[in-house]
Amino acid sequence: MTSYQPKPEDKFTFGLWTVGSRGRDPFGAEVRTSKTPAELVYMLSEVGAYGVNFHDNDLIPIDATPAQADAIKKDFRKALDDTGLKVPMATTNLFYDPIFKDGAFTSNDAKVRAYALQKTMQAIDLGVEFGATIYDFWGGREGVETDSSKSAVEAIKRNREAMNFLCEYAIENKYDLKFVLEAKPNEPRADIYNATTGHMLAFIATLDHPEMVGVNPEVAHETMAGLNFMHNVAQAWEAGKLWHIDLNDQYGGRYDQDLRFGSRDIKANFHLVKFLEDVKYDGSRHFDAHAYRTEDFEGVKDFARGCMRTYLLLKDKAQQFNSDAEVQALLAEINDQDAAMSGFLGKYSKAKADGLKAQSFDRVKIASRGLKYERLDQLTIDIITGTR
């Protein structure tokens, strides 16, 4: 019987900000006591995680003295060494401090833009120090409440200038580092630039070093926009840019909830897990989610275990789907390829074009064919729910 216990090869990671969340929300104060970064590492090792990721200020407070920073890093390093946990990804907090109230890289204030670059370079150094090979950029404040305040075109240019600068910084320092861009449509700003993964992919193509930059799609962020998350992940994969992924769950049409993975839309997450496993995605499976505010620290452990267990459950269901004889027979029937059409499809040629123009198609007969998608979808439900 499958145990659904995580293994290192699953590459399950959590952020210090996720398991370290104290449960504060806009309407209520913290409900859990603070834990040090080192304590969180030991906890993640206890529940079976592979790695831990961090913002610069998750690890070292923004106003820490050099002596305090050294002490924190020493304790964090010891915890990593004791547990064997990795740090696959790091990022910069460019959204919490009041200086970023009008953005970081896209701020109208040149001093803010310069400070954001300084802070990010220092944070990149910190991430590399602990072994990170992926560096994430989430532009949580890169947006507006009123379009009267900022030129959207100028904001694109400022963001591009910053990314080009930081790519050159990583190159000059010979860092083994790839950048990933994380999209979100809104919150905390009313509107955030580069709102979806598709926006990010288009933006990357305009950079000086597009080969260094990929994407980090997040379930909740795309779901907030009413989009099919798996489709966006597939687009990123097909473009060769899916270098990281943030897993959580989300009710549509609401602000970012960061729910435990698979706790809301189990079928959508089944198709997501199936896609990742079918294409053999080998990056981190990062859970950017938070425990319910109702939980104590033991409940946070339950939350972390639940994220990983649900992924493994869905992975098992995906394997069952792929080996189910009736499902596969239906898929073979649905995708039946008429050999007579092979001479018309694929790469263009004049002969193919001329042949197509001369070909006769029986539209009524073709359209009358039932595709059996209802049966296929119910079989999917039966597999997910364990009734098959």
Image (tube, rainbow, N blue to C red):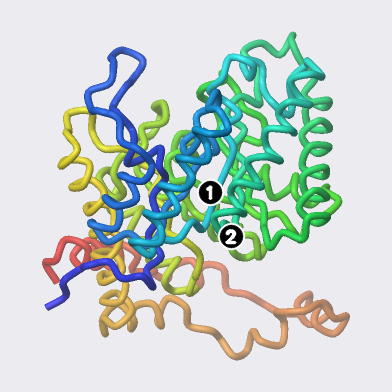
Q: Position of residue 356 (x, y in %)?
A: 75, 77
User: Does 18 sit left or right of 320 as displayed?
Assistant: right
User: Does 106 sit left or right of 312 as displayed?
Assistant: right
Q: Residue furthest front?
A: 67
Q: Between 77 and 269, which is closer to the camera in this rendering?
A: 77
**Which of the 4 image quadrants contains residue 131?**
bottom right
Q: On residue 21, which mark appears?
A: none
Q: CA distance from mark 1 to mark 2?
A: 8 Å
The structure residue drawn at horizontal position 80% and vertical position 56%, both measured from the top left corner, is 171
Q: Position of residue 149 (x, y in %)?
A: 74, 10
Q: Which tag, 1 or 2, sits closer to the chain's start? A: 1
The residue labelled by disc 2 is 242
Locate the N terminus by quadrant: bottom left
Tell me whether the residue at label 1 lies in contact with that at label 2, contact meaning CB atoms closer than 8 angstroms. yes
Q: Position of residue 335 (x, y in %)?
A: 47, 78
The structure residue drawn at horizontal position 66% and vertical position 36%, both measured from the top left corner, is 194
Asked if one can make out residue 92 in the rendered structure from this viewpoint, the answer is yes
Q: Amino acid at mark 2?
A: Leu
Q: Is residue 146 above or below residue 47?
A: above
Q: Amino acid at mark 1?
A: Pro
Locate the C terminus by quadrant: bottom left
Q: Residues within 10 Å of mark 2 (few under 14, many from 20)?
A: many
The residue labelled by disc 1 is 217
User: Does 153 sit left or right of 38 as displayed?
Assistant: right
Q: Residues within 10 Å of mark 1 (few under 14, many from 20)?
A: many
User: Does 164 sit left or right of 230 as displayed?
Assistant: right
Q: In terms of secondary structure, where does tag 2 sit?
A: loop
Q: Between 313 and 80, which is closer to the camera in this rendering?
A: 80
Asked if one can make out residue 228 in the rendered structure from this viewpoint, the answer is no
Q: Position of residue 266 (x, y in %)?
A: 27, 52
